[in-house]
Image (cartoon, rainbow, N blue to C red):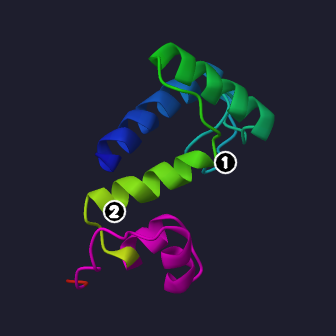
Amino acid sequence: MCIAALRSRQKIQEEASDAAGDKWTDSGLVFTTKWGTPIEPRNLSRAFDAHCNSAGVPRIRVHDTRHTCASLLAALDVHPRVAMHILRHADLRDHERLHPDPRRPARPLTD
């Protein structure tokens, strides 16, 4: 699911790069402006609100998407250490404190 979303984003970014031509800045970021530059936080919030409205879903803060991600990872039975890396927590104790999953104990980490 993530790979499909990232591939879709890559295609959108390639189209934006082609359209911008010499004005494109290759920042190495996944989400950028139409010129390839970093998105300003306030503009990100506005765009996020617009996407929520057009999708007909309740508006939440952009930061709350981290909590949604953590809940989805737990529901998908992703090992807490893997979820910790996805959410960029410094250590497992922080992750478990911020995103506890009281439904079940963690499954063993496998190769």
Q: Residues within 10 Å of mark 2 (few under 14, many from 20)?
A: many
Mark 1 crowd level (few <14, some 14–19, many ≥20, 10 Å Cα): few
Residue 15 in percent (x, y) is at 49, 24
- Which mark identifies residue 27? 1
| Local secondary structure at mark 2 | helix
Q: Quadrant of residue 52?
A: top right
Q: Say what secondary structure mark 1 lies in.
A: loop
Measured as percent of width and height from the top left, residue 105 is found at: 28, 80
Query: Which amino acid, by three-letter code, is at mark 2?
Result: Ala
Report whether 27 appears left or right of 41. left
| Cα–Cα span, label 1 and label 2 | 32 Å
Q: Amino acid at mark 1?
A: Ser
Q: Which residue is mark 2?
A: 74
**Residue 23 in sight from this viewpoint:** no
Sequence-wise, which precedes: disc 1 or disc 2?
1
Q: Is residue 111 above or below residue 76?
A: below
Foreground of the two, 74 or 14: 74
What residue is drawn where x is 52% and y is 33%? Answer: 13
With 78 as the anchor, is 27 left or right in this view? Answer: right
Residue 97 belongs to magenta span:
yes
> Residue drawn at (40%, 43%), measured in percent from left and top?
6
Residue bounds of the magenta highlight: 81-108
**Is residue 23 found left or right of 108 in the rendered image?**
right
The residue nearer to you, when weighing 76 against 39, is: 76
- Residue occupying image coordinates x 45% and y 71%: 100
Placement of the N terminus among the 4 image quadrants: top left
Please name which of the two marks, 1 or 2, marks the residue nearer to the observer. 2
